[in-house]
């Protein structure tokens, strides 16, 4: 899983401290001022609305986009408003700022949403960088997103829609991926795995996490390197492929797991197949029918098992049917290809709404946090949810889907696994 560049995060925190005197929390409409019962409202809260914004990597230098995260959030908020809102208030979702996967833009987007737009919460936050985390924590802004960054693990105002996925020592590791690969292979005993990631703080942390997880599941970890440049997609993958295919005592591992985004995965998987690799290939990002429009992309991803931390779209559960209907409604009644970014936005919004509903009519950050401190529910698209557990541990559930002849099929059904301690 991905982790932000710590030095940039530190710089962001310093900038936030310098500018704190100009922040929303010091102007009489901040989270510690007023209250609905006294006739004064908190930042972003009026008598009939709650203002919410988002931060999403709509664009990036590699062409990778999470723009449909915004559609997913709109879909969930639209249904909430159609059902009467939250304790009598409609959600005023002002849309998502594009951070371009740029740490400086991520912080700028957070500052704009809080200081200019005066939102009560940010949901969704979906990017590979989260340099605005320290600022949002300082300003006491409830923030929701995919818990693939360390900032979703520990800070009191920041929540992962499926819990914390990159824990610190003392936390736990989600075993969905190792156990899923073991299922595909008919067991982990005597089987080997290669794990590859980008050469970045995020990649190194991912290697550390999944080395432990696959070893705990019974695999021999034959290769585990954060070796691929993080700033550009390699044009020549031969060196990486050579190392991987000789990592298992001079032979190929039984599975290759990539902790990278789509552009890197396409290059690596294409090179592996051309080299004759016949083992299991897996990644956590490429569950997106939109990727299948190009022949080269479809061929590169054919046969790949993709990790999901939510129910597959192929599920027939009432919750999934409702999700599909909500997305269609938000898309103007059109049937649009579903992808995991939509689900990220949708479930980020869903968790925010559930806690806000529990907080009651007298909405404030303090009341919201009190509600979150004892929140739990069951049967959602990400399994059973519980806080504050989810700020230290993942909810532990997931599935694998495999692309076969242009169609995704469930290869390992949605299931919850017991996590292991992170060391």
Image (spheres, rainbow, N blue to C red):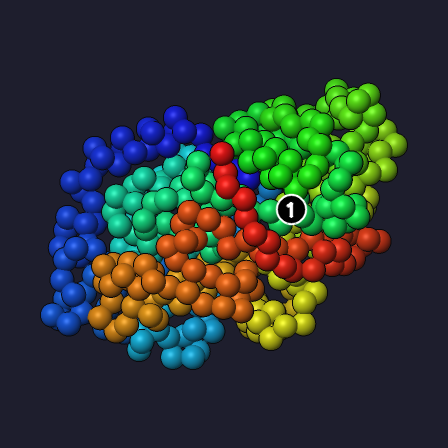
Name above or below for residue 101 compared with residue 341: above
Residue 289 is situated, as x and y percent measured from the top left of the image, at: 70, 55
Tell me if 284 is positioned left or right of 385 in this view: right
How dense is the environment of label 1, judged by Cα within 10 Å: few (below 14), some, or many (20 and up)? many
Image quarter in which the N terminus is found: top right
Displayed quadrant of residue 333 = bottom right
Between 345 and 109, the one lying in front of the other is: 345
Residue 253 horizontal side relative to residue 77, left or right = right
Q: Position of residue 261 (x, y in %)?
A: 62, 39
Tell me if I can see residue 199 in this picture.
yes
Q: Secondary structure at mark 1?
A: helix
Mark 1, residue position: 177
Q: Nearer the viewer, residue 134 or 47?
A: 134
**Can see residue 59?**
no
Q: Residue at x 72, y 46 (%)?
A: 181
Residue plotted at (50% across, 28% down): 201
């Amino acid at each position: 899983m991905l982790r932000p560049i710590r030095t940039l995060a530190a710089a962001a925190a310093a900038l936030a401290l310098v500018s704190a005197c100009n922040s929303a929390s010091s102007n009489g409409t901040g989270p510690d001022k007023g209250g609905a019962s006294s006739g004064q409202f908190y930042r972003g809260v009026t008598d009939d609305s709650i203002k919410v914004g988002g931060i999403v990597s709509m664009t990036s230098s590699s062409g990778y986009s999470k723009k449909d995260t915004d559609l997913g959030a709109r879909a969930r908020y639209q249904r909430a408003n159609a059902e009467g809102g939250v304790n009598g208030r409609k959600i005023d979702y002002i849309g998502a700022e594009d951070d371009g996967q740029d740490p400086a833009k991520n912080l700028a987007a957070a500052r704009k949403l809080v200081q200019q737009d005066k939102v009560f919460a940010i949901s969704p936050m979906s990017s590979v960088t989260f340099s605005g985390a320290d600022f949002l924590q300082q300003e006491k802004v409830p923030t929701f997103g995919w818990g693939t960054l360390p900032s979703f693990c520990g800070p009191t105002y920041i929540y992962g829609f499926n819990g914390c996925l990159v824990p610190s020592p003392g936390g736990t590791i989600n075993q969905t991926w190792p156990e899923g690969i073991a299922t595909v292979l008919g067991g982990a005993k005597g089987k080997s795995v290669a794990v590859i990631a980008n050469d970045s703080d995020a990649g190194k942390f991912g290697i550390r996490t999944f080395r432990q997880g696959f070893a705990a599941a019974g695999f021999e970890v034959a290769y585990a390197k954060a070796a691929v440049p993080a700033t550009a997609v390699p044009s020549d993958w031969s060196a990486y492929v050579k190392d991987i295919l000789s990592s298992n005592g001079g032979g190929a591992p039984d599975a290759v797991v990539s902790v990278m985004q789509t552009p890197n995965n396409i290059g690596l998987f294409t090179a592996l197949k051309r080299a004759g690799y016949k083992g299991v290939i897996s990644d956590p990002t490429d569950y997106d029918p939109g990727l299948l429009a190009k022949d080269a992309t479809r061929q590169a991803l054919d046969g790949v098992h993709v990790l999901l931390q939510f129910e597959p779209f192929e599920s027939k559960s009432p919750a999934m049917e409702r999700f599909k209907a909500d997305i269609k409604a938000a898309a103007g009644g059109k049937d649009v290809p579903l992808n995991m970014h939509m689900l990220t936005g949708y479930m980020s919004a869903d968790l925010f709404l559930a806690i806000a509903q529990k907080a009651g009519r007298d909405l404030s950050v303090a009341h919201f946090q009190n509600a979150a401190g004892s929140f739990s529910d069951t049967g959602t698209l990400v399994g059973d949810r519980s806080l504050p557990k989810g700020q230290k541990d993942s909810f532990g559930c997931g599935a694998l889907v495999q692309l076969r002849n242009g169609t995704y099929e469930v290869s390992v059904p949605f299931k919850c696994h017991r996590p292991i301690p992170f060391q």
